[in-house]
Amino acid sequence: MSVPLLNGSGCLDALTAPSVARQFDAFVTKTITPLPREGNPPPRIAETEHGMLNSIGLQGPGIETFIATVLPEIAALGIPLWVSVGGFSATDFTEICERLDDQKAVDTIELNLSCPNIDEAPEAAAELVAAARAATSKKLFAKLSPATSNIAESARAVVAAGADGLTLVNTIRGLALDPRTLRPKLARAAGGYSGPALKPVALACVFACAEAVEVPIVGLGGVQTGGDALELVAAGASVVALGTVLFTDPSAPTRIRAELVAEAGRHGFPQASDARGVARKTAELQRF
Ligand SMILES: Cc1cc2nc3c(=O)[nH]c(=O)nc-3n(C[C@H](O)[C@H](O)[C@H](O)COP(=O)(O)O)c2cc1C
């Protein structure tokens, strides 16, 4: 089996770049919140040596406008659709999931559990997943932040609460200073750090969670090449997503898909999916 490729939420606008979206096996929307949000003031994106910082701040039209105007347009592209949802309370997650439940175009709901003001402790994350689970029969993927002391514990908690899969990982908090002024490059100072530097963090999270739970894992964080994607699969991912790389390479999905197949072959795997979990099969690994 081939390894499905998705985009990372917030890293691709399918309506302005449909030709990029069509290279994926499914399209993931930017996180939708209950009410419209303007997001944070600019500058909201900054480059750093090994990745990118963003503080977009969940800008979006809100669930009502999304369902009325955006969803039909995205559905018309004919790509399987994942909707990323976020909120600030369990009630928010219930409300949005209820609204999406009867939308035929929506294949999967991804719960962004790393929203501002959201408590990311395992019990709190599980509460949000349980709220979503009670509101919809759609497939639910829980997207976790890597900034937690024990991600395996969070994985077990959200799966027990009804998540059908995990998306690992969201960005990690970072700060970039302008070397001339020694002031933050982003208006909100700190932001979410993504790109190549995140790969080892994502690998550690996928590795730990694949051991803790049986559900499918979407691996993302710093993927630039098919080799990077294969490493996430080896750590335990069954799907790979591309984020920051899409800002510089619109042909990344097609390129990385081809590289992934070639790289898997080079390692002796007939299919890339045959490499799933091999990093964990090495005998006597030091547990961490
Ligand atoms: C500009 C930007 C916007 C993002 N917006 C969202 C979002 O709305 N919801 C979400 O769950 N993740 C969001 N992310 C995180 C990505 O989906 C992904 O988890 C992260 O960037 C790590 O992958 P990467 O290193 O390949 O970029 C955003 C990332 C970037 C760079």
Image (cartoon, helix red, strand yellow):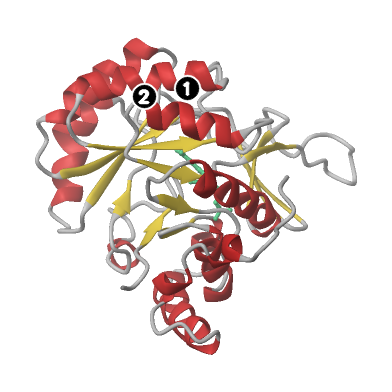
Whether label 2 lies within 8 Å of ligand 1 gets the answer no
Residue toward you, 40 or 225: 225
Find disc 2 in the rendering and name its residue: 161
Percent across and percent down for residue 218 are: 43, 52
Residue toward you, 83 or 75: 83
Quadrant occupied by the N terminus:
bottom left
Percent across and percent down for residue 255 are: 45, 78
Seen in the picture, residue 92 relative to 41 is either above or below; the reply is above
What amino acid is found at the position of numbered circle 2 in the picture?
Ala
Residue 49, quarter of the rendered image: bottom right
Q: Are marks 1 and 2 in contact (CB under 8 Å)?
A: yes
Residue toward you, 247 or 166: 166
Per the image, label 2 sits on a secondary structure element best described as loop
Quadrant occupied by the C terminus:
top right
Seen in the picture, residue 219 relative to 282 is either above or below; the reply is above
Find disc 1 in the rendering and name its residue: 125
Say whether residue 40 is visible.
yes
If you read the primary sequence from the N terminus, does the residue marked by circle 1 or circle 2 appear first? 1
Percent across and percent down for residue 106 are: 18, 42
Pointer 2: residues within 10 angstroms few (<14), some, or many (20+)?
Answer: many
Residue 136, quarter of the rendered image: top left
- Residue found at the far front of this picture: 284
Q: How many marks?
A: 2
Pointer 1: residues within 10 angstroms few (<14), some, or many (20+)?
Answer: many
1 or 2: mark nearer the eye: 2
What amino acid is found at the position of numbered circle 1 in the picture?
Ala
Seen in the picture, residue 282 relative to 156 is either above or below; the reply is below
Marks 1 and 2 sit apart, C-alpha to C-alpha, by 9 Å
Residue 149, quarter of the rendered image: top right
